[in-house]
Amino acid sequence: MQSPVLDTDEAPAAPAPRSAIAGWVLFDWAAQPYFTLINTFVYAPFFASAVAANPVEGQAMWGFATATAGVAIALLSPILGAIADAAGRRKPWIAFFGLFLVAGATLLWFGRPGAPDTVAIVLIAFVLATIGAEFATVFNNSMMPNLVPPERMGRLSGLGWAIGYVGGMVSLILMLGFLVASPETGKTLLGFTPLFGLDPLGREGDRAAGPLTALWFIAFVIPLFLFTPDAPARMPLKQAARTGIHNLVATLREVRQYRNVMAFLIANMIYMDGLIALFALGGIYAAGVFGWTTIEIGLFGMLLTITGTAGALYGGRLDDLIGSKPVILGSIAFLTLATFAILLIGPGHIFFIFETAKPMPGDGLFATGPERVYLLLGGVMGAAAGPLQAASRSLLVRLAPRDQIGQFFGLFALSGKVTAFVGPFVSSVVTLWLNDQRAGLGVLLVMFCIGATILSQVRTTEPTA
């Protein structure tokens, strides 16, 4: 079945058909398990606690791998976005980089606990999957202006993020309820024996996060290709490459004409780097500080997903009501406060004031005061992250020239990645230098504050409360 095409030179007078919007939204559902299962709550903590020599070294290596992928994305995303603008169609790019995601995620199965010879395979596969997920998202985002009028952009972006969060939560429930089992009991969180004969002692449930992510993406990205309008082809790829690169160079030369949108991209570059590092290392941090297992980290992830879904839905409506910029600034404020509070929590104390009992084997899930406070702060972080990501995407659509939307979404990906290697890199260096996971997260506070300061200078024509 051939999908419809839509001319990107004219804004839609009315929203696209529901089937088209549903197909576009399902991309977030399809891609989210990569970020939920692999990058945050299942595979990353498994790698740090079981595959790497120790959690500190594991956090550092995962951060360096994230940095490597970030460099590749930063260098290529504006160029590919500009080429896609010239070529017209977005779906072939989504398919191409979707293959990277599928291949990289599948290869993660080969990481085994206590097997240092698999570390290199895991890190290479992770970099490949990250590049695929991020580039596919660039081209999916650039389809937004074809689907709804500008006044509904915030709602569409918020809906996409919310559906993505729900997809992440459903995949996490499947992992914890049916695949990941405790090595001590051999049972999953729901009390079942793992499906497919997965061996708890070999941590095969954790390793299955990779293949599950790959199959999930393949299954749920299909509606995008069947029902969501794509732009018509404008020129052959070779000609599009020359035209796109020429247009990108011209844009960079005339950067003063785009000073406002460039200021936003710089702000996004900084605060999104902090968010990426926070979520990439948050589960690893909890595993190291509290000794949380995959099940506990997974439940923590569900909480973040629930609050993130609510935050994205409400933030999308608030975005259309008062504008993207106030939503972003408010979200950064909550993230900064929550992160600062987390740094004041340890296994035996809360805010360095209240002494508490330390976690002990057999205590049960989240048995101590610090763990419960960490859960509460994690809920705040999730509720702030949803609207931050959704409003950032819709603000760019409102600021960028329509005929250069792919190019600017490439720059948007660059702004989210060009220093993304700096955040994890600096956090990893500080973690190793001080041998303290808490110190590694502390550098993220500065990024949030600088990003908010720059964003406050961006001029918008949005409604004000």
Image (tube, rainbow, N blue to C red):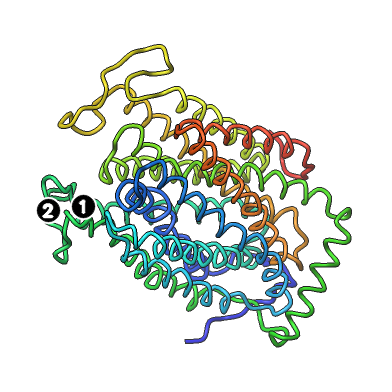
Q: According to the image, label 1 marks what residue?
A: 177
Image side of residue 248 versus residue 329, left or right: right
Q: Residues within 10 Å of mark 2 (few under 14, many from 20)?
A: some
Q: Residues within 10 Å of mark 1 (few under 14, many from 20)?
A: many
Task: Name which residue lies at 16% across and 54% down.
Answer: 201
Could you tell me which secondary element the residue under label 1 belongs to?
A: helix
Task: Name which residue lies at 66% across and 48% down.
Answer: 269
Q: Amino acid at mark 2?
A: Phe
Q: Quadrant of the C terminus?
A: top right
Q: Is residue 335 above or below residue 314?
A: above
Q: Position of residue 140 (x, y in %)?
A: 57, 66
- Disc on the earlier residue, 1 or 2: 1
Residue closest to the eye, 406 or 427: 427
Q: Is residue 220 above or below residue 311?
A: below
Q: According to the image, label 2 marks what residue?
A: 192
Image side of residue 26 versus residue 425, left or right: left
Q: Amino acid at mark 1?
A: Gly
Q: Is residue 140 above or below residue 46?
A: below
Could you tell me which secondary element the residue under label 2 belongs to?
A: loop
- Do the residues bearing badges 1 and 2 touch, measured as CB atoms within 8 Å? yes
Task: Name which residue lies at 72% across and 86% down.
Answer: 238
